[in-house]
Amino acid sequence: MLAIALFLAAAATWLVRRNLPDDATPKIPGLSGAVRATFDDRGVATVAAGSWHDALRVQGYLTARDRLFQLELQRRSAEGTLAELFGRAALDLDRKHRTFGFVHVAARAVSLLPSEESGHLGALADGINAFIESHAGRWGLEFAILRTRPRPFTPADALLVLLLMYEDLTTVWPDEVARVANDRLPEEVRRFVFSNVSEDDVPLVPDREALRPPPLPAVPAEQNPAPFETREASLLADGAAGSNNWAVAGFLTASGMPMLAGDPHLPLRMPSIWLPMRFEVEGTRVEGVTLPGLPGVVIGKNDSIAWSFTNLYTDVQDLYRETIEAGRAVRGRGSEPVVVRVEMIPVRGASAERHEVRETSHGPLVTGRFALKWTALDPSKLRLPIVAIDTAKGPEAFDRALDGFLGPAQNAVWASADGHIGWRATGLLPLRRAETDGSVPYDGTDPKNDWKGFLSPRKLPRVVDPPSGWLVTANNRVVGTGFPVPVSSHFWSAARARRIRDLIEESKRSGKKLDRAAMEAIQLDVVSREMRELARAFFPFLPPDLAKLVAAWDGRADTGSVPYLLARTLRRKLAERTLRLWRVQGGNVRLSDERLLDIATADRAAFRRAGLGDKGAAMRLVAEESVRELSSRFGSNRSRWTWGEANRLSAPHPLGLVPGLSFVFDPPRVPMPGGSGVPRVATSSFGQSMRFVVDWGAPDAATLVVPFGVSGHVGAPHRLDQFRYWLAGDPSGAATRLARPAVERTLTFAP
């Protein structure tokens, strides 16, 4: 037995080492000149080339070298062929993407791209394929275990990566389904449930007049309400979303020059979503993070401008309720045929599944007779002007380049080397029927409900050098009613934006100038005023030991915090009880922090008028149920309850889900500080996908960190070497500094 165990260990070690990145520099088709790639002590590559087409070829090669399995999974996810690798467990995801028809959209879109952009995608694909062809059988441990091989990468595959980002960042149609499911509720209940407007929003485009949040509705009390039941729900299920970015003017900084900070929040995965990289091309240095499968730097800086993005939540999805008679969709007095598309989905270990998709001119039917109109499904609207953004010389050129980026719509916040800061909206903004905003489905039979085109990107709102000295976006309502075209009704709470604004304003009032460490401290801030106030509303109804902790709590979501864990549970239980009593339908409906605070702090009369019963009895019941649930999960010793125990990192590699392979592929399941509604968004599987800080007073001291490392390979030295600094921060900035000398080998790719 010992001999067998030793043999298996030796075989596993050989297999791991065989698939680690090597120093090969094969011929890359189309390379016109020599390209040099150097690596710093974190394995981050600097690609020096005479042209962008050459640089992107080497970017493709290096991306495949470290992240080929990630590229393969992205492609398979978007085209709907994951079940071919993972069996029936992946069928639901494959069905969804087959319904959207991403692979057909991407194939048609390639021929519609501007020649420069299609050339960039072709160059990237050349580099990826050069790695695939030169490393037969050494593509990565995952390929060996799954006994599969990567297909050649195509320009259309890059557009599949873009379409996956569209899906992550613009999917709102389930919210519209939820509104339909609740259309029989009283109007004031629906207005309250689906609103997160507060009296302290942080719009960059102001409102015509101050918006007032909806009042607590008046609801007749039920005679026989159902008993309050505990759901088997995650402690993390109260919602998390989005990203942060902000810029501050030089008069607020220690260096006297503008500063920029950005931390996009996305699902936490192994390997990291982003791949850091630098380029030195045609006299321009660009550095930041790339998105494997796309050309160039997505978030970063060049010699004259630094930028970061957050999701704008522009509503680019509308549902149309179709009336279908004899296989035809009614259109006014006429009709059109419903197109049927049959997709065969290969399934590992089983027969292929037949998947039928029905489509109208509005889009595929995604649920019942609702067709989905979505900018992502229009091949003419896919664009990737990333290199134009990367090479923009100054704010005006940067602004022009962003006009060519059609989506997913983003808040672009920037700071420039010549002393300015700015924000602008990007992407497509549909022009809809007057007096509508797309928040509920349209009648598909009425042609007047069709989109009227899009607002010109040049007319999207923007702000440069505001008197306040700061610009903050955090997926909140950034564009107020002072802008003439409705942008969205799907934005998130302003809690994070308020906290970031307040910390900047606090520094202003105290006369303390911001530096890089202060900007990172804001990114790592875990204080939630909303959770603190909600927990205090329950103070009279809690056991004395917990009440004492709540009374002394400052709202911090530290790993050792008992009150934050309690507050999250109280929040969820109060929301469950409220939605049940109001008979709100749909499992994905959530009450915002603002609305839950309105409920928790309402007086007894308003609470009862809202159909929620006696406030004292209700709050006591919620508190008792919360304590009971936490005792069941974490034991009777309440002093040992901690937020970190509930909020352990869970960022599994796809093969980590296979029994026995988790310890090989997954990162450590460490306790996580932060939560939802705080600048440091952190749930077990969602959070800061990178952190980036630039001070134009010391641009070479810019810092950037990703959750794990640049390599996706088990056993690679740079697979987890950034993890400790992502988790704990880097106050000195030395460990995460972006500009670092080359200390490892140099690879030279010859034409």
Image (cartoon, helix red, strand yellow):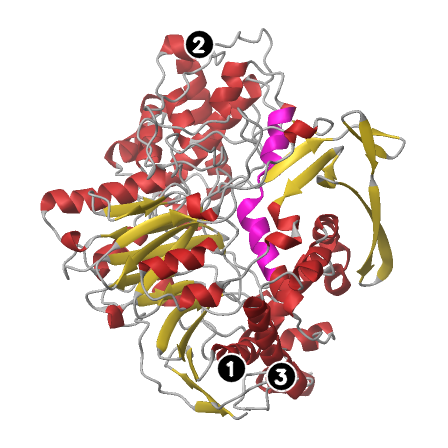
Residue 608, numbered label: 2
Could you say whether the residue bearing mark 2 is in a helix, strand or loop? helix
- Between disc 2 and disc 3, whose residue precedes? 3
Q: What residue type is labelled 3?
A: Ala
- Between disc 1 and disc 3, whose residue precedes? 1
Task: Give the vertical position of 175 relative to 642 (above or below).
Answer: above
> Contact (CB < 8 A) between labels 2 and 1?
no
Q: Can residue 714 be seen in this view?
A: no
Q: What residue type is labelled 1?
A: Asp
**SS majority, magenta:** helix
What residue would you read off at disc 3? Answer: 130
Q: Can residue 485 be seen in this view?
A: yes
Task: Give the vertical position of 554 relative to 291 (above or below).
Answer: above
**Left or right side of 318 for 208:** left
**Left or right side of 647 for 698:** left
Question: How many labels, in total?
Answer: 3
Residue 163 painted magenta: yes
Task: Give the vertical position of 608 relative to 486 (above or below).
Answer: above
Residue 455, numbered label: none
What residue would you read off at disc 1? Answer: 54
Residue 359 painted magenta: no
How far across and how far down the image is residue 194, in percent?
50, 27
Which of the image's four quarters has the N terminus?
bottom right
Neighbor class of circle 3 (other Cα within 10 Å; few <14, some 14-19, many 20+) is many
